[in-house]
Amino acid sequence: MILFAWPLLRIWLDDASTTFMVAFVLGMGLRLAMKSQLMITRTRAHVSAPVTFALILLAGPGALALLIWSAEPLLCQRFLSLYFVFAAALYIIDVVDGSYAINRFRWPQPEMRGTDAVLTRVMVIYNLAMVLANETLIHHASQTTWLLYFGLLPLVSNLIRTALVRTVQEGYASA
């Protein structure tokens, strides 16, 4: 969506900052819409309906509204870093307490049993590497380049995560 919207928005809107914000909001809105059913189902499995409603509104439209209200492209870019820092922190908590709950929830397949400790550490490194990549792009790339990165991020991050999971899984299968 972002990849197609950016050139059209750039033509229609005079201000580069406004164009960035509109493209970012379109991309985030689409991403939230695509993941909303899964997010609601997963949250609902752990908490009551009213709490689920409040959490989903706060995490999705609430965060998006805050970014729109700020009208600051840098804040939008940093929001992505914050997301990856939060994910890394959750995995670090899993390492410290030894529960590996996130991995067991995310990859419940029988073939993933026994990989929890290593995969959790790999996910910490992955998320911190994504923070580094995002911050590097913020400091050294144009907003257009960053939007391209943001637009391709779901595909790229899925490919990287899949490769990491399969590497850990195959390492345990051959051991």
Image (tube, rainbow, N blue to C red):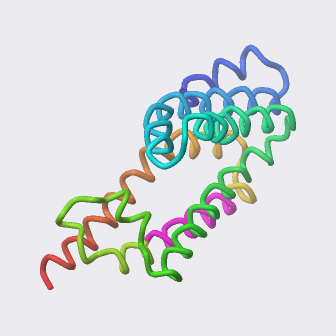
Which quarter of the image is occupied by the C terminus? bottom left
Q: Which quadrant of the structure image shows residue 139?
A: bottom right
Q: Is residue 40 left or right of residue 55?
A: left
Residue found at the very far left of the displayed protein: 174
Residue 18 vs 152, above or below: the answer is above
What is the tally of numbered marks visible in this picture?
0
* Residue 98 vs residue 165, the one in the foreground: 98
* Residue 150 vs residue 107, the one in the foreground: 107
Residue 15 vs 110, above or below: the answer is above
Q: Position of residue 161 (x, y in %)?
A: 38, 59
Residue found at the very far bottom of the displayed protein: 175
* Residue 20 vs residue 76, the one in the foreground: 76
Q: Residue at x 72, y 26 (%)?
A: 22
Residue 114 vs 145, above or below: the answer is below
Q: Is residue 151 left or right of residue 23?
A: left
Q: Which residues are magenta?
A: 123-136
In the rendered image, residue 127 lying in the magenta stretch gets the answer: yes
Q: Residue at x 34, y 67 (%)?
A: 164
Q: Position of residue 144 (x, y in %)?
A: 67, 39
Q: Residue at x 42, y 44 (%)?
A: 155
Q: Position of residue 30 (x, y in %)?
A: 55, 28
Q: Position of residue 112 (x, y in %)?
A: 24, 67
* Residue 87 vs residue 53, the one in the foreground: 53
| Dominant secondary structure, magenta | helix
Q: Which quadrant of the structure image shows residue 90?
A: bottom right
Q: Residue at x 82, y 33 (%)?
A: 17
Q: Is residue 21 left or right of residue 34?
A: right
